[in-house]
Image: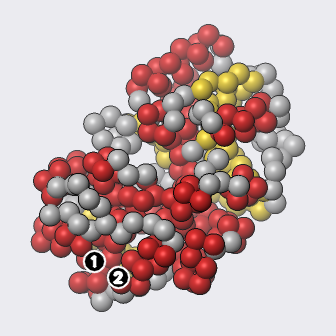
Amino acid sequence: MTTIRVGEASEVLVTRGMPDQLLPGRAGRNRTAIVTQPGPASEIARRVASLVPEPFVIEVPDREHAKQLEVLGAIYDRLVDENLGRGDTIVGVGGGAATDLAGFAAATWLRGVESVLVPTTLLAAVDAAVGGKTGINRNGKNLVGAFWHPTRVVVDLDVLEALPAALKIEGSAEIIKAGYLADRAIVDAYSVNGPDASLADVVPRAIAVKAAIVGSDFRESGVRALLNLGHTLGHAVEILAGMPHGHAVAVGMVAAATISHRRYGFDQATLASLLDAAGLPTSVEGVTRPEALALISRDKKRQVNDIRMVLLRGIEDPVIDVVTPEEIDLALAAVGID
């Protein structure tokens, strides 16, 4: 088992199988709410229920359908019925949407109760469940949210390795992103092995990249914004094209690499080829320029009238800077948005 610290508040356990003690040791715990999704996640939730005190399960819709005010309200109603108190725990079991939602419920219930997350997809394991960002969607992705660190995240490599190929491919986008930000060994692993890169190798490395960045900037006032590589356009593509998150981030990374090539001579072609070899898209169809610009301008990462993007001067050499309308148009055209 590998333990990765995320600042002082949180830890990620990378394991094979669930630990016998799923929740961190703490006296006075009484009840455990388990927020999960239908399908394979619900089976893992049953295993989780056998490891925690007085569990009750709240099933929510799959993927982004879960991250709605109505669903959150239903969770609150159940917590009232079950009398979940400040000394209790909310455990999120599932993909990124489930962990985002469970984390936000924990952040806001009684002004904050403990959360523990058990991601069941590769994307959630290396990104959504790590770092304390929680949220729901309202007229845009994650526009309502809070920073709330889970006390513990449990990443079971056996679960991840058994995932369907499509879910492994989707999660690989965030792993590759971590490699370009701060770990060349991840980029090398995908360059050599493509989608067959060893999860036992790249998953802890990707989590360690995110943990190091988050640990130095919990509330995204500075360096943590580097984790948004590919997300400025990616979130817009995800909403407008109905693309899975990882696929949309891959498209967004190509857009950012296009601007990076123009400014710094970054090797955008190699990044695009690596993403393509991993099974990820490098362009999108059916999205218009006005639609994309409208969502980019609404993005929560925007500052005043400026649109800032994470760019790459090279592998392990990211930078955050304001981009011009001309550069945005160039990036959009590069991924098929006219």
Q: Split into 4 quadrants, where in the image is the N terminus?
A: bottom right
Residue 287 lies in what quarter of the image? bottom left
Q: Position of residue 154 (x, y in %)?
A: 71, 49
Any part of residue 278 in sight: yes
Label annotation for residue 78: none
Nearer-the-camera pick, 72 or 38 = 38
Q: Is the Cβ of the residue at disc 2 closer than 8 Å to that at disc 1?
A: yes
Amino acid found under the numbered disc labelled 2: Gln
**Numbered circle sitting on residue 268:** 2
- Is 274 drawn above or below residue 305 in the view shown? below
In this picture, is 213 found above or below 190?
A: above
- Look at the picture and state if 221 lies above or below 77: below
Quadrant containing the C terminus is: bottom left
Q: Secondary structure at mark 2?
A: helix
Q: Return the disc, 2 or 1, that comes first in the chain's sequence.
A: 1
> Label 2: few (<14), some or many (≥20) within 10 Å?
many
Which quadrant would residue 35 be assigned to in this image? top right
Q: Residue at x 43, y 51 (%)?
A: 244
Q: Which residue is mark 1?
A: 258
* Residue 208 seen by the camera: no
The residue located at (30%, 50%) in the rendering is 241
Helix, strand or loop at disc 1? Answer: helix
**Side of 118 where 336 appears, left or right:** left
Q: Marks 2/1: CA distance?
A: 6 Å
Task: Pinpoint residue 179: horizontal percent, then vertical percent.
Answer: 53, 74
Label 1, residues with CA under 10 Å away: few <14, some 14-19, many ≥20: many
Quadrant assignment, res 94: top right
Q: Amino acid at mark 1?
A: Thr
